[in-house]
Image (cartoon, rainbow, N blue to C red):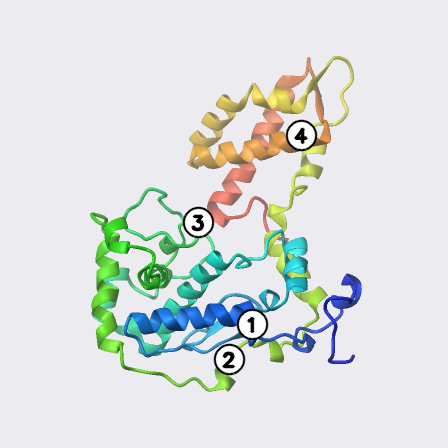
Amino acid sequence: MPLKVDLDTLDEKQLLQYRLCDLPIRIENTWLAELVDKLYAELAAHGLAFRPPCYLGDEWFSPEGIPAIALPFYLAHPRLITLERKLIGEAEGEDKTEAMRLLRHECGHAVVHAFSLTKRRAWREVFGHPMKPFSDYYRYQPYSKSYVRNLKDFYAQSHPEEDFAETFAVWLDGESAWREHYGGWPALKKLEYIENLAPTIGKQTVAVPKRDFFWQISTLKKRLDSHYKTKRKLYIEHEIDFFDADLQTLFPPPVGKKLAAARFLAGQTSELEHNVSRWTGEKKILIHNLLTRLKKRCHALRLEVNARGTDRVLVEFTAYLTSLVANHRYTNRYKPTK
């Protein structure tokens, strides 16, 4: 397959057959280069000589133990951003403000890797023990003032290293006004730790050989279609029709007097939220949001229930809703992974 690809004219079916390493993309001379330059300028403004090298990978990350930053390949070309958004539902970082938040966050990880910060007693006293297992699933307190707020889903609460990366991102942002915003918060202690740390590492630089650029786009030989098949498995629960088959089984075409399924569920909302929360231990807000999503799909599918058989349907739906919530509480997914 030729290495020269015209991403603007290639149809989607053909594009998905290309390997990631064959895509004619790079950071140089793109809007990503401007973001990297801005990151370096912010580091300089804070007295840090460290400049983590940035390269294209398959997602946002800083390789474990390597003071470098990978940016997702799709951000290097508008056509790939469109493809990512279509197949995944979003293109994380396509907005410049969000991209800078992510870049500062990954820079925080790179700083940890560059200076082995997790080995320091003071670091552990402030952020916690780094040996805590990493997991995409974590319980967070939305109103906690012990953590800064940079990325969505209160990501600082997921792990001590993520806590540092999020805190570093806020500290590095020249427009965050962190002293005022976090004044009186326990999180201020973490920001002040970084403020005091910066002068001690300010003049130090770290060289990173290109062989340590793990999962660099130029080395990834998987095809785009394979890449997205794997990635979609992680995002499938966010697709609009994810629950449709279940709902159609729960609400088959009724006989006799009919009642809209969405209307039926609306009348049971309070009781469902109370009972499911009571027996699963999950917060009502999560149950409310899930139930709202299910009601919207019932309405979109025009599902109905026999007006004289609602007791049986309510039992089945309650069991279904409870199973979804219980799975989510313990695995962060509504359904077990096949």
First in residue order: circle 1 vs circle 3: 1
| Left or right of 155, for residue 72 | right
For the residue marked with disc 3, what is the amino acid?
Asp
Q: Mark 2: which amino acid?
A: Phe
Secondary structure of the residue carrying numbered label 2? loop
Pointers 2 and 1 in contact (C-beta within 8 Å): yes
Residue receiving disc 1: 57
Q: Is 201 in front, or is 29?
A: 29
For marks 1 and 3, give the CA distance.
23 Å
Other residues around mark 1 within 10 Å, as few (<14) / some (14–19) / many (≥20): many
Q: Report the amino acid beneath label 1.
A: Gly
Name the foreground residue: 276 vs 80.
Answer: 80
Is residue 236 placed above or below 198 in the rendered structure?
Answer: above
Q: Nearer the viewer, mark 4 or mark 3?
A: 3
Res. 182 in view:
no
Q: Viewer-proximal residue, 111 or 43?
A: 43
According to the picture, the residue beneath numbered tag 4 turns out to be 298
Q: Label 3's element?
A: loop
Q: Nearer the viewer, mark 1 or mark 4?
A: 1
How far apart are the two marked residues, 2 and 4, measured between alpha carbons?
A: 47 Å
Q: Which mark is residue 213?
A: 2
Secondary element under disc 4, as helix, strand or loop, is: helix
Badge nearest the viewer, 2 or 4: 2
Disc number for residue 153: 3
Q: In this orientation, does residue 72 appear? A: yes
Residue at x-position 64% and y-position 24%: 262
Report helix, strand or loop for mark 1.
strand
Choose top left, top right, bottom left or bottom right for residue 105. Answer: bottom left
Q: CA distance from mark 2 to mark 1?
A: 9 Å
Q: Give how far across and how far down residue 154 sits, in percent.
A: 40, 50
Residue 30 image-quadrant placement:
bottom right
